[in-house]
Image (cartoon, grey):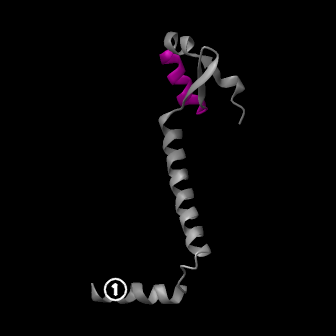
Amino acid sequence: MRYSSQVKPISYLKANAAEVLIHLAEQREPLVITQNGEAKAVLQDVASFEETQETLALLKILALGQQDVEAGRLKPAAEVVARLRAKQTTA
């Protein structure tokens, strides 16, 4: 995704805040806010932000799992299933 078309100065945000929020919700594209010609912030709608956070959480889980594999912290699936079944019958 190219953000060059979604760059606005902070003065635009100040003058058009309601419009910007509507646009963010409808287009679901982030908006880069500049101050003195320099990128300072990125605005996005809440739904996109939540999706991003969920994606990052899943990626972190995958990375942790990969670290476990590389470190040899593995157990055969049959052993794990047997332990879970044993816990279930005692609970």
Q: Residue at x 58, y 79 (%)?
A: 72
**Left-right relation of 83 to 61:** left
Q: Position of residue 52 (x, y in %)?
A: 54, 45
- Classified by dominant secondary structure, the portion drawn in magenta counts as helix
User: What segment is highlighted magenta in the picture?
Assistant: 17-29
Circle 1 crowding by C-alpha within 10 Å: few under 14, some 14–19, many from 20: few
Give me the residue at 71% from left, 25% from top: 4
Quarter of the image with the N terminus in it:
top right
Image position, residue 33 (x, y; %): 58, 22
Asked whether 43 or 75 is in front, the reply is 75
Q: Is residue 3 above or below residue 71?
A: above
Q: Is residue 77 magenta?
A: no
Q: Residue pushed farthest front? A: 71
Towards the viewer: 64 or 81: 64
Q: The residue tagged with tag 1: helix, strand or loop?
A: helix
Estimate the x, y position of residue 36 in percent, counting from the top left: 60, 14
Report the residue at 65% width, 22% height from top: 7
Q: Would you place residue 86 above or below residue 7 in this image?
A: below
Assign the C terminus to one quadrant of the image: bottom left
- Total count of labels: 1
* Residue extending farthest left: 91
Q: Amino acid at mark 1?
A: Lys
What percent of the width, then of the height, locates residue 35?
Answer: 58, 16
Q: Which residue is mark 1?
A: 87
For image coordinates 52% across by 23% down, the residue present is 22
